[in-house]
Image (tube, grey):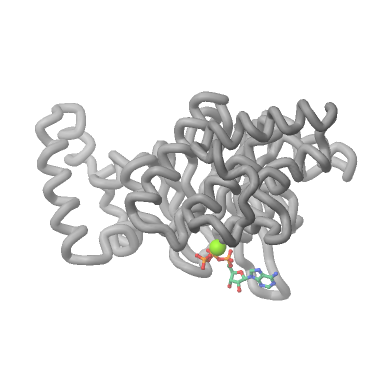
Amino acid sequence: MIELQDIRKSFGDKEILKGVSAVMESGKVNLIIGSSGSGKTVMMKCIVGLMDVNSGKILYDQEDFTGMDIREKMIIRQKIGMLFQGSALFDSMTVEQNVMFPLDMFGTGNLRDKKKRVQECLDRVNLTDAARKFPAEISGGMKKRVGIARAIVLNPKYLFCDEPNSGLDPQTSLLIDKLIKELTVEYNITTVINTHDMNTVMESGDHIIYMYQGVKQWEGSNKEIVFSKDQKLNDFIFASEFLRDAKEMRQMEMFQDNSWKDKLKKGE
Ligand SMILES: Nc1ncnc2c1ncn2[C@@H]1O[C@H](COP(=O)(O)OP(=O)(O)OP(=O)(O)O)[C@@H](O)[C@H]1O
Ligand SMILES: [Mg+2]
């Protein structure tokens, strides 16, 4: 579990994160959504320690990450897997070498053990036969999967993905979402995803945090989003007429289920 307590981050006199508090549970896919420039990437960089917050606390399983020295932070970082935007693979390395990279940096064991672990991860993301290929020889969706294999090779407790679906078609995006969700549940990982992808929000949003101008404007699940009366959230999620119609249809479907009637009346 990761907990944010009133975190603030500024660049010069521009405050990007204006006191954000949130809890991200393990075994769940926690989504951070919000328009471009709302501070999603800055927030993720602060959580993983690539940027320092100005104030507030970040706790990893109750341990205060913000108060740790470099050596202690390093121990937490080894438990973090990260899928960067655009996959960020090393072009001059094969798929196998890319996935092995974190093992060479942090891992122990001999080359045979490392190769075995890499192959396990490649099998897990359905890239069994791609080990000897170079990034330039594989598709965008395959690159994302190599990125995921690299992110999980050290058995992370925490997984961060910045826009894992950017540049992918809707079907491939759903496969990537499904894979991330399966891994999250299978290994009880605390997963945090920054996304613009509405399919992701509606399909795998166990816990959604909507950021608006540096504050947490709304938080809830993909089911609750359908009934939310938050105007800013609705303008963001259901931006087109088509999606507004879809929302109404989904509301009607869910209205058949009694437990949602009360929520709808209350406007939660
Ligand atoms: N290193 C930096 N120095 C100064 N300003 C920065 C820096 N990094 C980000 N910002 C500013 O912080 C704000 C939030 O940026 P951020 O990248 O977090 O947005 P985002 O929500 O991830 O957007 P997108 O959806 O486009 O990825 C922007 O106004 C950006 O210019
Ligand atoms: Mg971003």
Image quarter hosting the C terminus: top left
Residue depicted at 20% across the width and 33% down the height: 260
Residue 194, image x, y percentages: 51, 53
The reply, left or right, for residue 265 in relation to residue 170 is left
Toward the bottom, the furthest residue is 13
The reply, left or right, for residue 70 in relation to residue 194 is right
Residue 150, image x, y percentages: 65, 43
Residue depicted at 64% across the width and 33% down the height: 119
**Is any atom of residue 53 visible in this view?**
no
Residue depicted at 10% across the width and 42% down the height: 252
Residue depicted at 17% across the width and 62% down the height: 242
Classify 192 as above or below 42: above
Residue 217, image x, y percentages: 44, 55
Determine the quadrant in which ligand 2 lies: bottom right
Quarter where residue 108 is shown: top right
**Is any atom of residue 87 visible in this view?**
yes
For this rendering, which residue is in front, 224 or 85?
Answer: 85
The reply, left or right, for residue 223 in relation to residue 68 is left
> How many numbered marks have been drawn onto this rendered protein structure?
0
Quarter where residue 251 is shown: top left
For this rendering, which residue is in front, 156 or 117?
Answer: 117
Classify 87 as above or below 23: below
Image quarter hosting the N terminus: top right
Residue 170, image x, y percentages: 33, 54
For this rendering, which residue is in front, 189 or 15?
Answer: 189
Quarter where residue 257 is shown: top left
